Amino acid sequence: MKVMKFGGTSVGSVNSILSVKQIVEAVEEPVIVVVSALGGITDKLINTSQMAAKGDAAYEKEYREIVNRHIEMVYTVIPAGDARTVLLDKVNELLSELKDIFQGIYLIKDLSSKTSATIVSYGERLSSIIVASLIKGAVWYDSRNFIKTEKKHAKHILDSELTTRLVKETFRELPEVALVPGFISTDKNSGEVTNLGRGGSDYTASVIAAALNADSLEIWTDVDGFMTADPRVISTAYTINELSYVEAMELCNFGAKVVYPPTIYPVCHKNIPILIKNTFNPQGEGTIIKQEVNSGSKAIKGISSINDTSLITVTGLGMVGVIGVNFRIFKALAQNGISVFMVSQASSENSTSIGVRNQDAALACEVLNEEFSKEIEMGEISPVVAEMNLATIAIVGENMKHTPGIAGKLFGTLGRNGISVIACAQGASETNISFVVESKSLRKSLNVIHDSFFLSEYQVLNLFICGTGTVGGSLIEQIRCQQQRLMQERGLKLKVVA
C-alpha cells in the first residue's frame, strides 16, 4: 500500500486533474490519495472572507468566481449522468453553506480564527469529492474524523497518538482507492474545524503513511523534484535524484518549497521513502528521499534561501560569562510564538544574532527589550533592534562532513564577487552552512555559489554531453570515468567522440 498526495496545481485545471485520474488508476495496489484544494482557491477563500469582514459587498463577486470554478470543473471532467447529478448536489450543498458563512461575516463585520479555519476547509472538501467522483472505484473519507489537533501556544498542533489510532481504525479495511481531503482537521476536545497550516496536505499524507506503515509516500506536484537551486533564479539548476531525510529537511527549512517541512519526520521515523514526482511529467524520475543514499562525489546537494529575513542581535558586555542569557532569549520568543530559523553567537558570548521572518521582527524586538529591560537600563546590554531587508542562504549536503575546504571555497567565492556576509552559522553535523546577506545580493550570491559548486564541471563537459564536441585521447578516459556519476546525478547522456 502507498499514499499519494496531489497538490493544488495538480488538481487546478482540467488537464492536470485528468492526469491525476490516469496516474492513480494505473496503480496496481491499494492506494490512499490525499488532495489539496484546487489551485488558488485557498487564497481566494481567505481574500473573500476578509472582504466580507470589511463590509465590502464585492465579496459576492469573489464568491461567485469560487462557485463557477468548481461547477465548471464538474461539468468538464464528469460525464453527464447520475454520477454528475449526485456530485453537483453535494458541491452545491457545500457552496450554499459557504455562501451563508460569508453573508454572516458581512453582516456582523467580524472574522474569528474559528470561522476562518472553517472557511478554508471548504477548498479541500470540494476538491476531494470532485476527484473521488472522477477516479474509478474511489471511496471518500472525511479527514476531520481522524486527523486531530490540540491547542498549544495559541496554535493547533497535531495530536499524533490519537490521530494514529484513529487512522488505523478508519483504514482497517482498505478500498482500491481511498480519497482524503488534505490540510483539514478538528480539535480533539471541541470538535471545531482546524487545519495543519499552509502545505498541510503534505503533512496529512505523511501522517497517514506513517500510521499505516505504507511502502512509500508520493508527493505529486508541478516540479520534477528537488533542484540544486531555484530554477527561476539559476537557469542551469537541475533535479537532484536522491536526498537523505536530513538533506531534504535542511533544504525545506530554508525555502525549498517542494515539501512542507513537517512532512518528513513521520515517515523518516518509520523509514518510509518519499518520492517527489511531477504530475505534468509523470515519466520523469523525480527525487527520492530515504535514509541512505549514494554518497556520490558532490560535497553539497543543493542551495536554498529565505528572502524575507530580519537579523536581531542581542549584544552587550553584560552577557559575557552570564548563564541563562540565551535561555531567556529563546523562552521570550517562544512564549510569543516567534520562530527562529538561524542562530549565530560570538565565542566571546557578548552577542547572539537570530534570524526571524520580517513579519516577526517588530514583535521580537519588543519582547526582548522587555525581557532585558533592567540590563538595558543599567547599560549591560544594548537596546535590541532588527536589521531588515536581508536574505538567508544555505548550502546543504551530508558529504560536507569532514570535507576540508568547503567553507573556504564558499566564502572565498562570495568575497571574490564582492558579496559581504553579515552573519553565518554551521552546526556540528556539518550538513548545512547558513549565512545572511543583503537582499539585493541574493540573486548574485545564488548564481556565483551554483557556478562554483555545480556549474564548472557542467561547463567543461557540456559540449560532450550535448554531443557537439570532440576531445583528444588523453581526456577520453577521464571523461568516461565521470560518465556514470554524471548520468546518476543528472540523468544526462554523455557522448564522447574520439
Image: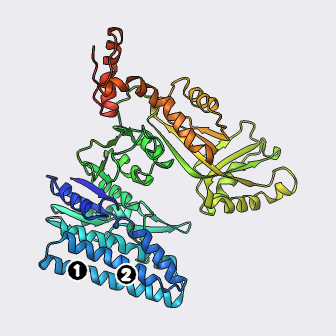
Q: Note whether residue 208 is visible.
A: no
Q: What is the three-letter code of the residue carrying label 2?
A: Arg
396 to the left or right of 218 = right
Point 81% across, 51% down: residue:
382
C-alpha distance separating marks 2 and 1:
16 Å
Residue 417 location in percent, x, y? 62, 32
- Is 29 on the left or on the right of 201, as rendered? left
Mark 2 element type:
helix
- Residue under label 2, please give it: 64
Question: Which label belongs to residue 203?
Answer: none
Q: For residue 13, which quarter of the picture? A: bottom left
The residue at which mark 1 appears reads as 88
Q: Is residue 264 above or below residue 103?
A: above
Q: Quadrant of the C terminus?
A: top left
Work out whether 100 lies above or below 223. below
Residue plotted at (50% across, 36% down): 431
Q: Would residue 67 appear left or right of 32 to someone viewing this image?
A: right
Work out which residue is located at the far bottom of the displayed protein and give it: 107
Identified by mark 1, the residue type is Leu
Q: Nearer the viewer, mark 2 or mark 1?
A: 2
The spot of residue 458 in percent (x, y) is 41, 28
